[in-house]
Image: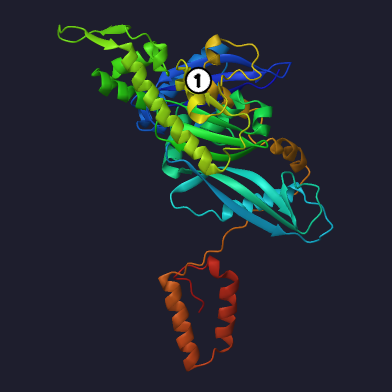
Amino acid sequence: MNEIIVGLDIGSKQVSVVAGRLDSLGKLEILGLGKADTTGRVSKGVVLNVNKTIEAVQSAIEQVENQANIHIRGVVASIAGPNIHSSKHKAGITRQTRGEEVTVTDVDQVANDAQRTFISQGNAIVHNLPQEYSVDSANGIQEPVGISGLKLQGEFLMIISPQAELDKTKRCIERSKDKMEIEGGLVYSPLAASLAVLTEQEKKTGVALVDIGSGITEIVIYYKNIVRHVAVLPFAGDSITTDIEQGCGVSIEQAEQLKVKFGSAIADEVAIEEVVSIPSANGRKPKIVSVKNVAIIIEERLKEIMALVVAEITRSGYLNRINCGIVITGGTAQMPYIDQLFERVAQRDVRIGYPNENLGKTFTEEIKNPTYSTAVGLVWRGIRDIDEREEAYKILRKDAPVIIPVVPVNTTINKSSRENTKSTETNGKKSSLGFFGKLKQAASRIIGEDLGDNDKYE
């Protein structure tokens, strides 16, 4: 029986926990689905209230444990937020012999060197995704292992998160249960979603995944099976809710209900005479809201979001390379006619991304909702890597020598060291060192690290 993998996604509206495993046909069998509300506890993917979020995570995990009759000790978890960004870095090594073939150890060394050159105060690397390599004068190589050459260079797309936000997310997960482990490190949310909703052909030919959640809209561009660009926009489903609240003069809770129950991405699809009666407090008359007006508000905000998405794809340089168009997923992707509206704005093929790519038997049909794309994708991440090249490299690493990380040299000199150096130089000018003085100096160089400030040779 295949290992059970648990995916945990902390979103701005809810925590989603999914347990699954590969069946005999290589499809994903869903064993359980747990969820708990995080409204007010998480905003735009960032944890605001750690203790309340821990409670939500605990509740969702317990649901899955009861459904699947399992004991969860480790999860594959996501990270998201408006401050996550990407940066490209290059690194290279010169090998010993030109005629030797590039090994997986060489590839790993280049990746490690790229990470060591990354310096950003208060930030941490979530992913270090290889783009393409060059071996000597040959460029544009996707898989350099086995190619002969002297100089190996690689370009990497680093996904970076503020360390404080990363730590808060980790605390919420690790404190949800005793000895809970995060397996394989946190996964950037839209990368996980891409594993659940995109086909291999789409990633190869070129596609943009647009994950429209509650607080943020996240973009991932694939081309030739490689993640080429990621971006975050601070507008999503909550922006639509706020617009309805202000435009219709209702509470934020009523605005959310109007959006979910009566919303439409294209106002022309709504009859002009259709209205909704909204109950008022303190015995006041009910408020009559035009569903047509609600749709107009939704359409205008979605047009703005999509225009920003197109601008970001254009800025990436891949607008004319996404031949498979755009795939929309996330909770807001459930809005009726949203794919048709986005096609008009983007002038590209658009489809809704459901997390049913290679899905087998499911505990509940609800799992096929775009809301759970990231959670299902996290289960897939526990089975396979985001970069398909890693699958072959994992096998090669079993027989490869272990890379010993290079520790950066600490060039900081403290005050006492400077004073000792100055004193030695001064004394050296006045008189030369005697035999015992030279012996002491030599001993200091050998075991000096073990001597404290008060250690003396008499």
- Count the labels in the image: 1
In this picture, is 452 found above or below 192?
below
| Observer-nearest of 432 and 115 | 115
The residue shown at (57%, 60%) is 408
Q: Could you tell me residue 233's position as x and y percent? A: 43, 35
Specify the color scheme. Answer: rainbow
Q: Which residue is mark 1?
A: 340
Report which quarter residue 276 is drawn in.
Answer: top left
Report which quarter residue 83 is drawn in.
Answer: top left
| Observer-nearest of 291 and 378 | 291
Q: Could you tell me residue 174's position as x and y percent? A: 48, 31
Left of 223 or right of it: where is 66? Answer: left
| Observer-nearest of 224 and 300 | 300
Left of 384 or right of it: where is 8? Answer: left
Q: Could you tell me residue 125's position as x and y percent? A: 53, 45
| Observer-nearest of 173 and 147 | 147
Report which quarter residue 69 is drawn in.
Answer: top right
Residue sticking out furthest to the right = 99
Name the element at disc 1: helix
Q: Could you tell me residue 88's position as x and y percent? A: 56, 49
Q: Amino acid at mark 1?
A: Gln
The residue shown at (58%, 32%) is 183
Q: Is residue 233 visible?
A: yes
